């Protein structure tokens, strides 16, 4: 194995360990020492890949965002045009429901870390801009629905909203579609 391949492998081990810690125990338990212990790596390998803990946490967040975007794009590509909004909502809900650690990292833990929260806000505004389709008139509604969707997902994952997955998808799809009305 080349030195670059070994470095890349160690980086993945660190990302996986950080994801697991962040998604199960939270940001308070996700320290450089804990990540290195979980990855079974010496701390010098941590600093080979990341300048600091915040850089690692953002990399975990970004990796999840990329995985979600890929899953959504794949699902939308095979959906009829009149079902694409529902497919986006359904795939997003399923993504966080199939592995609750994803939802915790994307929605809960991002609120407790300033660097992650900035990334969460950037992602939310980018999604709202995409939904608004360049329309200044739809920016407020799109931002409202994206932020609301995040809050609803957090409450649903926490059990504070007690509807079935199907009902959650139905209701949030209706809200997204109301932007175009």
Image: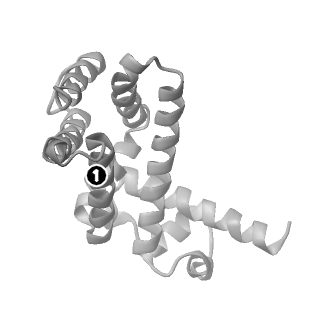
**Residue 181 at x, y percent in the picture:** 16, 25
Q: Is residue 23 left or right of residue 131?
A: right
Q: Is residue 139 left or right of residue 103?
A: left
Depth order, front residue of 36/53: 53
Image quadrant of residue 116? bottom left
Q: Is residue 72 left or right of residue 46?
A: left
Q: Which residue is the extreme one toward the right?
A: 1
**Looking at the image, which residue is at 46% across and 53% down?**
20
Quarter of the picture containing the N terminus is bottom right
Depth order, front residue of 17/95: 95
Marks counted in the figure total 1
**Looking at the image, which residue is at 50% across and 54% down?**
63
Q: Which residue is mark 1?
A: 124
Question: Eyeballing the image, is 171 above or below 133?
Answer: above
Question: Eyeballing the image, is 161 above or below 110?
Answer: above
**Looking at the image, which residue is at 37% across and 39% down?**
100
Colouring of the image: one colour
């Amino acid at each position: 194995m080349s030195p670059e391949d070994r470095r890349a492998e160690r980086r993945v081990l660190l990302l996986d360990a950080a994801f697991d810690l962040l998604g199960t125990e939270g940001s308070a338990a996700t320290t450089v020492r804990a990540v290195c212990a979980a990855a079974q790596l010496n701390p010098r390998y941590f600093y080979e890949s990341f300048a600091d803990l915040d850089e690692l946490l953002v990399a975990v967040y970004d990796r999840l965002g990329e995985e979600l975007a890929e899953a959504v794009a794949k699902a939308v590509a095979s959906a009829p045009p009149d079902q694409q909004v529902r497919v986006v909502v359904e795939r997003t809900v399923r993504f966080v429901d199939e592995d609750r650690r994803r939802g915790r990292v994307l929605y809960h833990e991002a609120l407790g870390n300033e660097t992650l929260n900035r990334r969460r806000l950037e992602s939310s505004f980018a999604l709202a801009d995409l939904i608004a389709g360049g329309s200044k008139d739809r920016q407020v509604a799109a931002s409202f629905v994206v932020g609301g969707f995040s809050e609803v997902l957090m409450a649903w994952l926490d059990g504070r909203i007690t509807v079935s997955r199907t009902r959650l998808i139905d209701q949030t799809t209706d809200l997204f579609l109301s932007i175009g009305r």
